[in-house]
Amino acid sequence: MGLSELKINEHLLGKYTLEEYKTPLDRSTAMHFLRRITFHPTPEQLSSIIGKTAAEAFDILVGDSTESLPEATSSMKSWLNKLEEDPLSNLPNDIRFEIEGRHKSHYGEFIDWWLDLMKNDNFPASEKFTLFLSSIWSVEFTYDTLSLIPPPLLFRNNQTLRKNRIGSYKDIAKEITLDGSMLMYQSLFYSGKGSPNENFMRELMELFTMGIGDLQTGKSNYTEGDIREGARALTGWRTVAYLGQDGAPANRPFETFFMKNQHDTESKKLFQFGEISPINDDDNTEYLVKDKEVNGLIDILFTYKGESITRFICDKIIRFFVYSNPAASDLEIINELANLMLANDFELKPVYKKLFTSQLFFNEDFRASQIKTPPEYVIGLERMFDIDFDVLSGGYSRNAISKLEQVLYDPPNVSGWKGYRSWISTTTFPLRIEYSKELIDKLTDSQIIKFVKKFDNYSNPDLLNFDLISYLLPKSISSDRSTELFNILLNEISIAGWADAVNSSDNRAIQGIRNYLKRIILSPDFQLC
């Protein structure tokens, strides 16, 4: 089987309904649920939600976002609050390269930390939602050709997204607008009175909140005038990114601060009726400008363009979690979710719960309809077989995901990754197979036995075959293919002798399981979730 055999059916969401799916989850539906909300469940996680309703499973999996944020490693803590000089500030080349080398090393350490959270994500699961928001509010570690965003800012951005992962999208917009990494990436770091930088304001509306045109009407959501007015409201904001930075307050490393002499204090008007009043010098302070102008600007966007924003975001949710290519006729479903989001003051959790507990979500047509993203593929392998690539070779997971063309916190542009069918190519497909084979080859005999013994039916080869297929593949397969896999698994061991062979770690059983896994990973549907 090869890349040409990888097919994804075209679907129309509009054929389905968001009415609640009330049937208790069986092995198949529980696996589908977990594949989409985690990077692949462990057998233990799977067992914990079988028999639950979708609503019960949702509450267990998603939580309420009051959980403590994960701590940085002790190594990361040594640099998370440490400022460096700006490497592009006319330093001698040897010093510049030394600083940039540290930034790159710290960036890799930060990404490895995040990937480790993905590998060990338990209930409530948070990392898939964090990745989703990160794919919208894109930030590039390497930007403007030579510039590097200091990794402590990337860490703070990541924690902000995680904290708000199921919260108010309006609150996310307010926090990320003054996020230090975003200020640098979108050049608000240099925006001032008389020369406002329009980059962020344009992307805020085009890519982060509402899109160029309304999904339903097609009418333009904003004008060039709206961009200019909004950019004026965002002048004067900086972040303490470098040692010895002009105007930076002391003892506030990597915090956002305000330069009043760079802020445009005149009135601004967006969408004809949304007005920000002029302010006097007494009101031109960090606290008041943040409240009246920055938050006021976001409030105007969400007040006057709320319907467009909720449609835009719900469309992205469906593309990321359900199906990557919804059609124009799917607007009925998008609108239903958008109306729910609007009625709940832009909260994401009610939308997620409605979607993830719906008949649409569990419909057979939407299983195996998504190509695994590089993190889903690589981290999924590690979670399936309970083996950490990075224990074998530091940075392996990060490098593998990057070679599969998703460099976390360094997308190709502010739009993020194209995704969908672009995840599979003549370059990346062979690499996926290579990584899978390498992992299975590195499994020790004892790890092979430990893996199958996680399944309650491991001593019955027929039932084990069924369990393994449902665990490793996203959809049921033909009886002929199941029989082929069954025979590979048995490896000429009798059915009656299978349990003893596994329990005694017989080489024939170990080799049969290893060959079985290799056969599975060569299957085109192993690329799907």
Image (cartoon, helix red, strand yellow):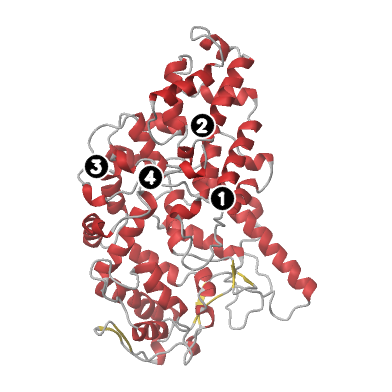
Residue 346 spot, x, y in % from top left: 29, 62
Using the rendered image of the protein, determine whether residue 227 is visible from the camera's viewpoint.
yes
In which quadrant is the C terminus drawn?
top left
Marks 2, 3: nearer the viewer: 2
Q: Which residue is at a point 60% across and 63% down the rendered structure image? A: 151
The kind of residue on which mark 2 rests is: Ile
For the residues carrying marks 4 and 3, which lies nearer the camera in this image? Answer: 4
Q: Find the residue positioned furthest to the front.
A: 4
Q: Earlier in the sequence, mark 4 or mark 3?
A: 3
**How many angstroms separate mark 1 from mark 4 (CA)?**
20 Å
Lower sequence index among marks 2 and 3: 3
| Amino acid type, mark 3 | Gln
Q: From the top left corner, tell me how far across and down residue 3 is, in percent.
A: 51, 44
Which secondary structure, mark 2? helix
N-terminal label among 2 and 4: 4
Between circles 1 and 4, the one closer to the viewer is 1
Instruction: Please name the residue that numbered disc 4 is placed on.
Output: 369
**Along the polypeptide, which appears first: circle 1 or circle 2?**
1
Q: Is residue 351 above or below residue 342?
A: above
Which residue in the structure is indicated by mark 1? 426
